[in-house]
Amino acid sequence: MKSTKAILGAGILASMLVMSSSALAQTVGFSQIGSESGWRAAETTLTLQQAKERGIDLKFADAQQKQENQIKALRSFIAQGVDAILIAPVVATGWDSVLEEAKEAEIPVILLDRMVDSSDDLYLTAVGSDLVHEGSVAGQWLVDELAGKDCNVVELQGTTGSSPAIDRKNGFEQAIAGKDNIKLIRSQTGDFTRTKGKEVMESFLKAEDGGKNICALYAHNDDMAVGAIQAIKEAGLKPGSDILVVSIDAVPDIFQAMAAGEANATVELTPNMAGPAFDALEAFMKDGTMPPKFIQTESKLYTQADDPQAVYEQKKDLGY
Amino acid sequence: MNGLMLFMRRIWPQLLTLAVIVGLISIMFPGFFQISIANGRLYGSPIDILNRGAPVALLAIGMTLVIATRGIDLSVGAVMAICGAVAAWGITEGYGLFATLAMALAAGLACGLWNGVLVAILGIQPIVATLILMVAGRGIAQLITEGAILTFNHEGLIFFGSGSVFTIPTPVIIGVLTGAIITLIVRRSALGMLIEAIGINLRASTLAGVNTRVLLIAVYMTSGLCAALAGIIAAADIRGADANNAGLWLELDAILAVVIGGTSLLGGRFSLIASLIGALIIQAVNTGILLSGFPPEFNLIIKAVIILIILVLQSPTMRTVAVFFSKDPVGASDKEKETVAP
């Protein structure tokens, strides 16, 4: 008797579950660029996590940095009749025909992190970060931290000509524009790598009176900042106090540096692009709410006051 | 005494170029020669040139021998990434410093063996044979680091990148020692001459009884070993193995160093010292650009123009012109002959 009740109860519960999820996406295809960087690996990990939490069956395809693989993956998702497609496009052009195929099959497509050059009625929405905003968050932090004190800033740019380097530079310059106490005295590319970040910082230190002339470093990514921090230490100065360090990305290693007091602030480029994407998708599936064409993720500022050690522990297993 | 004179005559163009570039930098940046001691280590721009130039100098040592055999080794940058990854992996897995270094060096030797077998046994053209590892090597390195930057905090391993002995940075010492040891080996034995013989005529050397296969493999393994040392230094310098970026495009800098050093890509006569000076010239240009404060958009253009000027001045046509305009054309051309065939 008891067991029949239990079975009945379980049956009702199960049918409720099915009903509740029937309005939502059940299978979603995700075409990822490949494992080009630690950040991308973390994005993959978080997308899988988010899908699992929401009970979505995620079909994952790794394109190994090739557009033709992504197009193949999209076609196979369409053939399988998935409910929605997430894609992090490797390049901006050449997506029109495959996106039209998805549209004809009435499968909504959401772009993650990167944009495409196609017309915006071919995809539901795009989730991404505003690179200019990231730069200005970093710049604003420095403005607030200095509170009017004079400061000479050196800048480690990303790869010359790349859009993150251009936008993060512009954003920072916008934030410090009109602040007479802050001067950008040197700016050079560190190619987004630790080695170059260290080498260029070494030359900055020598060119600016052994670093005595420098009060802050702005690096377009954390890896260059980590390299530069070593250069500052080897020059006998204290990063974090003699020279303030602010950078962008929020990878785990910079939190270790912040916990040790060697870095001051970082702006997060969140790898959780899938969360907002799934939210938008759920709302769309439920009652047809059209999301805006661009969903901007939060560019969160982390400082030494945000318990960097705890953030490090939380981030270190995401595959960065 | 005569030997020293010949030696100086061989390397004076390189020394002069280096002096001119260093002179130009010190005009633009007057504080260039200030050297102090920070954290028990020599500190200053000239030290930076030596220290940052060490990986390319190490690669250039191996590359010189390979090029002398009329070969080329495009894989050294990727081998750096592999060996750096092996070192970081070994130390984080707790194998201890000695075992880690041994594994990293063994990885370099194995890569060299692979290249050597492709070239010497299978007879594949060196540029193609080493291209395979150049392309595949970063993949191998990424497999070892699992795609992330593998960081470590082992003081013993870090010593090879940012440590010092008697205030001289470790990479400089490793570079100088390797250069000295390999120069001694090839010049105090017949090996150097045999390597040149292979470069001039492989078939004739084989017929004359030189074990060309073994020697070729040994040369590529030496190149692999030098790349391993450079890889360990690069990883130790940033306390992490960056499979994507460690040694990226450094094979081209190494080849350029050998060319600036005056060794012909067609094989034959070579000079290790001149290649080392070539590596320093390249690094002096790099450091000079960084110190100059030009916007980064100009970096590559400035470098290209300087390299172009150096190569044009060294070109055979310019030599002919120089001889033509010199006051004593006959004597000058005699001197030329002497340097070519001492």
Image (spheres, coloured by chain):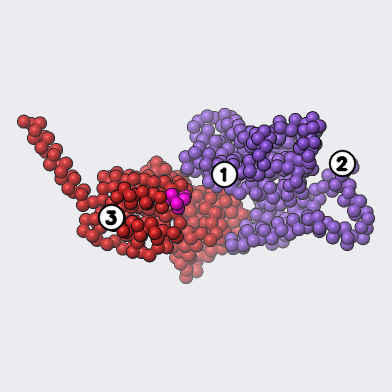
Chain colours: A red, B purple
Q: Chain of mark 1?
A: B
User: What residue did someone put label 3 on?
Assistant: A281
Q: Residue drawn 53% across and 56% down?
A: A159
> Which numbered disc flags the more N-terminal residue, 2 or 1?
2
For disc 3, the neighbor class at 10 Å (few under 14, some 14 to 19, many from 20) is many
Quarter-of-image position of residue B170: top right
**Whole-percent x and y of residue A257?**
47, 46
**In-image side of A9 versus B156 (left or right):** left
Residue B114: percent from the left, percent from the top? 62, 35
Which of B284 and A278 lies nearest the eye of the viewer? A278
Badge 2 marks a residue whose secondary structure is helix
Above or below, B201 against A39 in this view is above
Q: Are marks 3 and 1 on the same chain?
A: no
Report the side of A258 relative to A110 (left or right): right
Cα–Cα span, label 3 and label 1 = 40 Å
Question: Three-letter amino acid code at disc 1?
Answer: Val
> Which element carries disc 3, helix, strand or loop?
helix
Nearest the viewer among A129 and B200 is B200
Residue A306 to residue B130: above or below: below
Query: Label 1 belongs to which residue?
Result: B135
The residue shown at (59%, 34%) is B107
Under mark 2, the amino acid is Gly
Q: Are marks 2 and 1 on the same chain?
A: yes
Work out how far the residue at label 3 is from the one at label 2, CA to CA, in angstroms.
79 Å
Could you say which disc has been placed on residue B3 in the image?
A: 2
SS of the residue under disc 1: helix
- Tell whether position A91 is magenta: no
Q: Chain of mark 2?
A: B
- Callout 3, which amino acid? Leu
> Which span of residues is magenta-colored?
A65-70
